[in-house]
Image: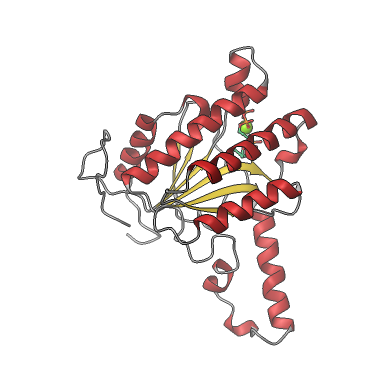
């Protein structure tokens, strides 16, 4: 874990330890819209703005890895008009990111199965990954059509195939073998996962990687989430005693 480096003004004390990897389950857009008698799509637009602000802030304060849960493998169960508005929002964001973030230091990665997305969205995802690959700043994993069970099934299939092809022996399979077949291969596990919207569940997010992650549940809906809330989550993280099974 890195020691906190105060790059830009934030409400955090320089004594605090900064989580190296933060995960955020960006939840509560629909309820935010409902409270305002707006369509759910308005909640997603408001959530997308907060995503931009919080991503920039995490990069500014020196977070090394940020994983945001944007769309789960189960979210396809939603009504078609909601899915359509989400896909439009993803497309707008990815076009904007390509256009406006040329001088940025953030490395963009997508975790999840890209196959079900439209050709143009998949192309934008690939272009964003490709154009940011050689940057040296924060790694931003955007979890889209991500489900941890799906990720683990894929890892099991890959490993089985390698065993069948004689490239891997069953006796050599260990935890590192599994970790390195996940979308997050080569990245540290999340130290902190934040879930706004007050839900006490993981909703198929990073089941393997979160074995020893600290959870912070916040009673704010994602579109209301602020930099101060992120600071608060980091303070709470610092108050935890992580034992990893030891004493
Ligand atoms: C999170 O907000 C966004 C996605 C899952 C795509 P929700 O849309 O789940 O908002 P609530 O939970 O219904 O309020
Ligand atoms: C989790 O939120 C997925 C994302 C935030 C992308 P959901 O709203 O889909 O989760 P549940 O249905 O409340 O568990
Ligand atoms: Mg939700």
The residue lying toward the viewer, choosing from 171 and 179, is 179
The image shows residue 178, relative to residue 233, as above or below, that is below
The image shows residue 217, relative to residue 238, as above or below, that is above
Image position, residue 7 (x, y; %): 26, 44
Q: Which quadrant of the picture is home to ligand 2?
A: top right
Q: Is residue 221 visible?
A: no
The residue lying toward the viewer, choosing from 136 and 188, is 136
Instruction: State the quadrant of the N terminus.
Output: bottom left
Q: Is residue 194 visible?
A: yes
Q: Residue furthest right?
A: 80
Quadrant of res 80: top right
Q: Is residue 52 left or right of residue 43?
A: left
Image position, residue 46 (x, y; %): 55, 25
Q: Is residue 122 left or right of residue 195?
A: right
The residue lying toward the viewer, choosing from 16 and 42, is 42
For the point 60% across and 68% down, which residue is it? 181
For the point 31% across and 39% down, which residue is it? 235
Image position, residue 58 (x, y; %): 39, 43
Image position, residue 47 (x, y; %): 55, 30
The image shows residue 171, relative to residue 108, as above or below, that is below
For the point 74% across and 33% down, which residue is it? 84
Instruction: State the quadrant of the C terminus.
Output: bottom left
């Amino acid at each position: 874990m890195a020691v906190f480096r105060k790059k830009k003004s934030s409400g955090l004390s320089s004594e605090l330890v900064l989580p190296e990897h933060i995960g955020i389950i960006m939840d509560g857009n629909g309820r935010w819209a409902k409270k305002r008698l707006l369509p759910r799509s308005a909640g997603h637009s408001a959530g997308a703005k907060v995503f931009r602000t919080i991503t920039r802030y995490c990069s500014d304060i020196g977070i090394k890895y940020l994983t945001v849960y944007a769309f789960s493998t189960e979210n396809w169960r939603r009504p078609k008009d909601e899915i359509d508005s989400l896909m439009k929002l993803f497309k707008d964001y990815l076009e904007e990111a390509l256009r406006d973030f040329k001088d940025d230091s953030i490395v963009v990665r997508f975790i999840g199965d890209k196959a079900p997305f439209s050709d143009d969205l998949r192309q934008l995802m690939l272009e964003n990954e490709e154009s940011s690959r050689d940057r040296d700043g924060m790694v931003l994993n955007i979890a889209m059509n991500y489900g941890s069970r799906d990720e683990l099934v894929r890892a099991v299939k890959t490993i089985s195939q390698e065993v069948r092809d004689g490239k891997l022996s069953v006796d050599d399979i260990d935890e590192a073998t599994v970790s390195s077949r996940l979308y997050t291969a080569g990245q540290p596990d999340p130290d902190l996962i934040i879930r706004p919207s007050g839900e006490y569940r993981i909703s198929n997010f990073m089941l393997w990687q979160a074995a020893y992650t600290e959870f912070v549940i916040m009673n704010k809906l994602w579109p209301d989430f602020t930099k101060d809330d992120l600071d608060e989550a980091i303070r709470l993280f610092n108050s935890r005693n992580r034992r990893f099974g030891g004493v």
